[in-house]
């Protein structure tokens, strides 16, 4: 059974999860200012670009989704044991599956319209023929892939739970796993062992684009095995932490050391990706495995470090943070067409890259918060995304 929920700890986890979602707006807001980004990845290319935007995107990508999925695993287990299996699936269908089904066609249509506008703008106001690789791109869950992967992770967790209930009636295997996780999270250095399965999954990924880190699993009905394993693994860590909430205190105590270790390995990976050593990673298996290990260490260190920092500094109840945590779900779902439209509108201006980047992110977040206040929070959309409010 899970420990009784701790309200203060949940405030911290809500805030960190919201931060992971909002960093997605920052990441996508930076892409048009990154040099040499392929059109298939991001079609908007600003006239003012800088390598610092590439560093920002790279570092955010290391930890953002693993932070989100670890917290999702912890909170999902708490919800599963509070509601029971049937009510849990009804809740997830309403809060996760239905928003995906409703939001995807709207976001796809708006993004297609903005992409056509951008294409016309880059060709002097005349729309050229659409590239065939764009027309043949196939399935794309867009930025909403995280909702689709969450449904897979719920199914995997439910299946593992059912199997363990049938085969481990006395709970001995789960108790052994509890002891192992306690030992690994006791110190920052021990917790680095959690990176080994992630490094193995990345290193074995066929045709791995190693500069991109964990591949985005949003382009097929059945997710690729490597990213599904990585996110299922961190989701499972969160699920296991909920079995013994006292482990959050261990994560909190070592937050600074874990964050420093993670940041150090993140910049090691960045240096490899941006230098001539990248040729060795590209062509020599040993360097590829070393890069995979360094990337996994960066992911684990940054993920646990940031969650621990949230536990350390954001546990006190805060009405602004709570409001932002509620709004973050809507903001992330709705942000991509708006961010791309702002980038397209301003891409030809001669202003400095850092000023336009800040304008895109701040204006986008302001408009999204405004729309949340007027059209989401007091309506059925808010009830769908965040549950009923008193």
Image (tube, helix red, strand yellow):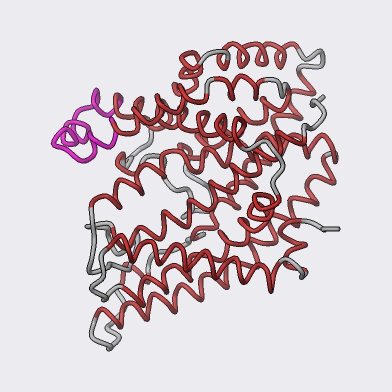
For this orientation, the residue located farthest to the bottom is: 126
Q: Which image quarter holds the N terminus?
A: top right
Q: Which image quarter holds the C terminus?
A: bottom right
Q: Which residues are magenta?
A: 268-289
Q: Along the line of sight, which residue is nearer the eye, 67 or 251?
A: 251
Q: Position of residue 102 (x, y in %)?
A: 65, 68
Q: Along the line of sight, which residue is nearer the eye, 139 or 29?
A: 29
Quadrant of the image occupied by residue 172: top right
Q: Position of residue 337 (x, y in %)?
A: 48, 70
Residue at image point 61% right, 67% down: 103
Q: Is residue 204 left or right of residue 314?
A: left
Q: Position of residue 93 (x, y in %)?
A: 74, 54
Is 277 colored magenta in this rendering? yes
Q: Along the line of sight, which residue is nearer the eye, 291 or 68?
A: 68
Q: Is residue 62 left or right of residue 389?
A: left
Residue at image point 23% right, 65% down: 48
Q: Position of residue 135 (x, y in %)?
A: 37, 72
Quadrant of the image occupied by residue 127: bottom left
Q: Is 10 drawn above or below residue 200 in the view shown?
A: below
Is 334 colored magenta in this rendering? no
Q: Is residue 126 left or right of residue 336?
A: left
Residue at image point 65% right, 21% down: 249
Q: Is 386 drawn above or below residue 123 in the view shown?
A: above
Quadrant of the image occupied by residue 136: bottom left
Q: Is 74 drawn above or below residue 143 in the view shown?
A: above
Q: Is residue 96 left or right of residue 121?
A: right
Number of numbered callouts drawn: 0
Q: Along the line of sight, which residue is nearer the eye, 18 or 236?
A: 18
Q: Main secondary structure of the magenta part?
A: helix
């Amino acid at each position: 059974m899970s420990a009784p929920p701790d309200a203060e700890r949940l405030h911290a986890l809500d805030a960190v999860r919201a931060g992971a979602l909002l960093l997605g707006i920052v990441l996508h807001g930076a892409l048009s200012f990154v040099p040499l980004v392929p059109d298939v990845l991001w079609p908007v290319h600003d006239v003012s670009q800088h390598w610092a935007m590439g560093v920002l995107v790279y570092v955010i990508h290391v930890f953002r989704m693993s932070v989100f999925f670890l917290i999702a695993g912890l909170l999902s287990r708490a919800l599963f044991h509070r509601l029971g299996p049937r009510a849990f699936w009804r809740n997830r269908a309403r809060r996760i599956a239905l928003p995906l089904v409703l939001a995807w066609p709207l976001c796809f249509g708006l993004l297609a319209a903005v992409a056509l506008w951008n294409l016309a703008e880059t060709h002097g106001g005349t729309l050229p023929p659409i590239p065939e690789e764009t027309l043949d791109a196939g399935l794309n869950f867009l930025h909403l892939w995280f909702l689709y992967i969450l449904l897979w992770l719920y199914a995997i967790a439910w299946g593992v739970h059912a199997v363990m209930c049938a085969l481990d009636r006395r709970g001995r295997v789960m108790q052994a796993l509890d002891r192992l996780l306690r030992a690994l999270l006791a110190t920052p250095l021990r917790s680095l062992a959690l990176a080994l399965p992630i490094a193995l999954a990345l290193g074995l990924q066929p045709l791995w684009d190693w500069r991109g880190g964990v591949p985005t699993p949003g382009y097929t009905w059945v997710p690729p095995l490597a990213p599904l394993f990585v996110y299922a693994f961190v989701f499972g860590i969160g699920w296991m932490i909920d079995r013994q909430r006292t482990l959050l205190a261990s994560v909190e105590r070592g937050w600074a050391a874990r964050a420093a270790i993670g940041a150090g390995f993140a910049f090691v990976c960045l240096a490899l990706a941006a230098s001539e050593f990248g040729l060795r990673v590209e062509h020599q298996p040993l360097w590829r495995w070393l890069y995979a290990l360094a990337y996994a260490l960066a992911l684990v260190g940054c993920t646990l470090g940031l969650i621990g920092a949230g536990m350390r500094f954001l546990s006190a109840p805060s009405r602004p943070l709570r409001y932002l945590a509620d709004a973050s779900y809507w903001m992330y779902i709705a942000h991509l067409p708006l961010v791309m439209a702002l980038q397209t509108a301003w891409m030809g201006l001669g202003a400095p890259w850092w000023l336009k980047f800040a304008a895109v992110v701040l204006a986008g977040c302001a408009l999204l918060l405004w729309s949340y206040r007027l059209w989401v929070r007091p309506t059925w959309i808010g009830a769908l995304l965040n549950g009923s409010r008193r």
